[in-house]
Image: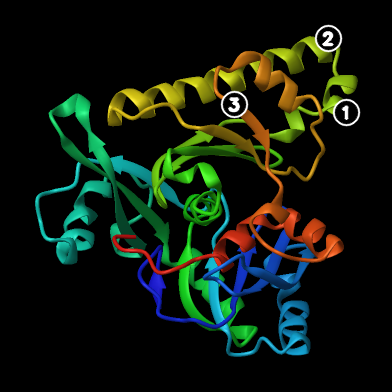
């Protein structure tokens, strides 16, 4: 089993399982070399432990038992740190960076699972290389692994949301030039920048749909103004992230920023960001990168992290 990355040689269908804020997402895709086909998906409301039996039953009913499985742990259950990696061979990099995260986590290092993946060269520091280190409690990873074992999947890898979203970005036509995705949960989000199938930058967004929705605005005194201010702050966070990517890696601006579907509709988000950003802003349409029936695609949009997990392909250095 590979944690937070690795290579896979599987050519059959892949089952993705994600731990979302309000439940567990399940997605199965086939035909990875061309436009992947969504065979089926399901979203189970509730805590992971409460979804375990329903997940197992659905996998069995669908005939996905022993299929290749890729899991995604939930936001907030791990740390993602950008570092300057030591000058060691790739095979030794994971062990070499463990000491660098010792003071960045609030639990003993021997309780942590640590992995690392390289990103672009930081040109502000005379070509210094960059890497991201992922650290999670072993119990968090084992929780996800246990859920997948109970469903009788063949565990291939367990990833973090940023790498799952990277798999989606890699299917977009702008990926070769550089593309950005904005993912918003209820209370937090993340913006990522990818280029050529590689994650280049990932930054947390400190608020989510609960503070941006029209419903939230209607419940607050001066709610409309508060929402507009948060939209401006969101745009500022995005612009700073894109500027950092361009200046640090000496890259041309990303070709587009895609807004991923949200559980709570935010019809004002697209025009607000289009008005505040110089980068082309687009709504993401899942049907443009995978094939599937309308109802299944709607369900799959609710568990995009599981879609990204199922899209996981062979990649070097991850």
Residue 77, given in percent of the width and then of the height, sits at 52, 53
Of labels 1 and 3, the one closer to you:
3
Label 2 to label 3: alpha-carbon separation: 30 Å
Q: Dot 1 corresponds to which residue? A: 215
Task: Judge from the rendering whether residue 130 lies leftward or rightward of residue 302; answer left or right.
Answer: left
Q: Dot 3 corresponds to which residue? A: 280
Label 1 to label 3: alpha-carbon separation: 27 Å
Q: What is the crowding at mark 1: few (fewer than 14 residues within 10 Å), some, or many (at least 20)?
A: some
Q: What is the crowding at mark 3: few (fewer than 14 residues within 10 Å), some, or many (at least 20)?
A: few
Residue at 58%, 90% in the rendered image: 66
Residue at 82%, 15% in the rendered image: 223
Element at label 3: loop
Task: Judge from the rendering whether residue 245 lies leftward or rightward of residue 42; answer left or right.
Answer: left
Which numbered disc, 1 or 2, marks the residue that appears first in the sequence? 1
- Residue 222 is marked as 2
Which numbered disc, 2 or 3, marks the residue that appears first in the sequence? 2
Label 1 to label 2: alpha-carbon separation: 13 Å
Which numbered disc, 1 or 3, marks the residue that appears first in the sequence? 1
Residue 99, given in percent of the width and then of the height, sits at 20, 52
Query: In terms of image quadrants, where is residue 74?
Result: bottom right
- Check contact, mark 2 vs mark 3: CB within 8 A: no
Residue 54, given in percent of the width and then of the height, sits at 78, 78
């Amino acid at each position: 089993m590979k944690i937070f990355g690795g290579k896979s040689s599987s050519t059959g269908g892949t089952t993705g399982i994600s731990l979302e804020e309000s439940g567990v997402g399940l997605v199965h895709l086939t035909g990875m070399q061309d436009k992947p086909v969504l065979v089926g998906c399901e979203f189970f409301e509730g805590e992971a432990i409460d979804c375990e039996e329903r997940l197992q039953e659905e996998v069995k009913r669908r005939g996905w038992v022993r299929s290749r499985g890729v899991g995604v742990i939930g936001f907030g259950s791990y740390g993602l740190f950008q570092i300057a990696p030591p000058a060691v061979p790739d095979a030794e990099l994971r062990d070499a960076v463990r000491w660098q995260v010792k003071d960045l986590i609030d639990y003993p290092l021997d309780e942590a699972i640590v992995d690392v993946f390289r990103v672009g060269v930081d040109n502000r520091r005379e070509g210094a290389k960059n890497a991201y280190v992922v650290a999670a409690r072993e119990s968090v990873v084992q929780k996800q692994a246990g859920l997948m074992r109970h469903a009788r999947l063949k565990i291939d890898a367990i990833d973090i949301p940023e790498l799952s979203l990277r798999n989606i970005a890699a299917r977009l036509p702008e990926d070769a030039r550089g593309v950005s995705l904005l993912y918003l949960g209820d209370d937090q989000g993340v913006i990522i920048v990818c280029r050529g199938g590689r994650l280049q930058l990932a930054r947390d967004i400190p608020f989510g749909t609960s503070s941006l929705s029209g419903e939230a605005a209607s419940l607050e005194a001066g709610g409309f103004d508060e929402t507009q201010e948060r939209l401006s702050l969101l745009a500022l966070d995005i612009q700073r992230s894109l500027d950092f990517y361009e200046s640090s890696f000496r890259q041309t601006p990303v070709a587009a920023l895609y807004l991923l579907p949200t559980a709570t509709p935010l019809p004002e988000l697209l025009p607000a960001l289009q008005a505040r950003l110089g980068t082309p802003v687009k709504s993401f349409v899942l049907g443009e990168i995978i094939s599937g029936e309308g109802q299944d695609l709607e369900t799959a949009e609710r568990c995009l992290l599981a879609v990204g997990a199922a899209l996981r392909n062979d990649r070097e250095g991850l």
